[in-house]
Amino acid sequence: MASNHEEVKLFGIVGSPFVTRVDIALNLKGVQYKLEEEKMGNFSDTLIKYNPVYKKVPVLVHNEKPISESLVILEYIDETWKQNPILPSDPYKRALARFWSKFIDDKCLNAARKVAFSLDEKEREEGYKELEVAFQFLENELKDKFFGGEEIGLVDITGVFIAFWVPILQEVIGLKLFTIEKFPKLYKWSHDFTNHQIVKEKLPNRETQLAFFKARYESLVASQ
Amino acid sequence: MASNHEEVKLFGIVGSPFVTRVDIALNLKGVQYKLEEEKMGNFSDTLIKYNPVYKKVPVLVHNEKPISESLVILEYIDETWKQNPILPSDPYKRALARFWSKFIDDKCLNAARKVAFSLDEKEREEGYKELEVAFQFLENELKDKFFGGEEIGLVDITGVFIAFWVPILQEVIGLKLFTIEKFPKLYKWSHDFTNHQIVKEKLPNRETQLAFFKARYESLVASQ
């Protein structure tokens, strides 16, 4: 499907875990693309035109055709560029990959948001417990080096938020949940995944992210 | 893939829109399966064993292998039994089908729940507005007889909740939102879809559903 004439654009924001998923997938496939940088809270008219429903990034535009929602984009990328598959070929394994990928969005993201950014102590504790349960499910599910086996796949890419951002958030708020003692396999996975060449090239700068979330957290605490 | 020796079981509850999605998809494919009926609020140990994460129906068990989450199940069914495709073959059309299918779960279900079951008037009004916006998006998206074109597909099947249950909920609470005047194409789709032979065979009894939601609504109103 790939040709020299095709145009691939990614509307995104540096530091968005959802955009980073798409960055990693395109890098894994070796697809050349242009990042159209958007500004948080002040999206361009073009972005809104391409994603009128959610009005958010990422939006992948392939030969003028826009696709929104990161998990939908990942499947599109895998179906369009066949090299280095993101999903397994067996239907049952594909179903499991989709299930755990959805699980990360359903169960880990909201819980982590509560832990890191809620002003309500009860809600923060609730988020902590939810995250602990979710991590345990993932710990049990991780059988090989990556969720995708020996190579990275859909669940790994979806989980970039856990691998890269959770340790940062943890450092900012002084949490000790995602540790090598509590989740040895998941912790090691986090290290292996963020150090994978394809992934590393697409992660935002750690110090910048740390500074950003520190400032955000401090202003949150100050507002209490 | 289908053989005479295969065993297909669907753990479900009659009257669940999520289970009905799977019922319709299996019927469309002509797959024989056994419905293992669960009781709401009192799920069997087998169900919990098969779906320890969400502990809910539907769960499809194909040759002892369990799959949860209705949208994941629909994709599995489409990949396992190739006849009468649920998803289009073109990657971009597949992406759109996945996008709108996810949209129904993200935007319509919660909004409808708020409208029908919230005790808070402000929240009910908020739900009404959200649902109106969501229906308008779907109205604009509907180009042919069905979302899938001339045949039913992923978005239609996911939307069974809108086609069948929304009119019932509307009747119960005396709402006039989903009408032929406001959403002519979507309204006609709702009629065509629920009268499609494959779909009709799998819908629960309308009067029973009406009575169930009437009782639920009345007890809700009485509790205020």
Image (tube, coloured by chain):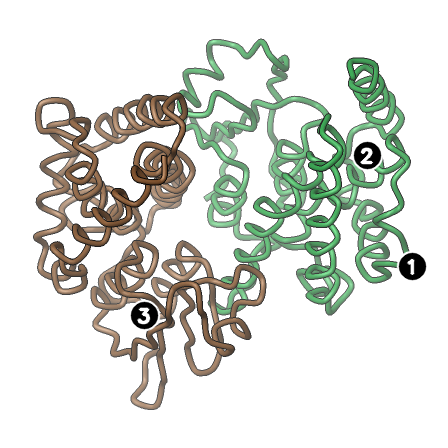
Chain colours: A green, B brown
Mark 3 closeness class: few <14, some 14–19, many ≥20 residues within 10 Å: some
The residue where tag 3 is placed is B81
Quadrant of image for the C terminus of chain B: top left
Q: Position of residue A96 (x, y in %)?
A: 55, 63
Mark 1 or mark 2: which comes first in sequence? 2
- Name the residue rendered at 73%, 28% in the picture: A117
Q: CA distance from mark 3 to mark 1?
A: 44 Å
Q: Is residue A215 left or right of residue B67?
A: right
Above or below, A130 relative to B142: below
- Name the residue rendered at 72%, 67% in the picture: A140
Type of amino acid under label 1:
Glu
Dividing the picture into quarters, in which one does residue B19 lie? bottom left
CB within 8 Å, label 3 to label 2: no
The foreground one among A46 and B99 is B99
Type of amino acid under label 3:
Trp
Which chain letter matches label 1?
A
Q: Is residue A93 left or right of residue A109?
A: left
Which chain letter matches label 3?
B
The residue where tag 2 is placed is A169
Type of amino acid under label 2:
Leu
Dividing the picture into quarters, in which one does residue A36 lie? top right
The residue where tag 1 is placed is A181
Q: Position of residue B124 (x, y in %)?
A: 35, 27
Q: Position of residue A147 (x, y in %)?
A: 69, 60
Q: CA distance from mark 3 to mark 2?
A: 44 Å
Which chain letter matches label 2?
A
Above or below, A73 relative to A209: below
Q: CA distance from mark 1 to mark 2?
A: 18 Å
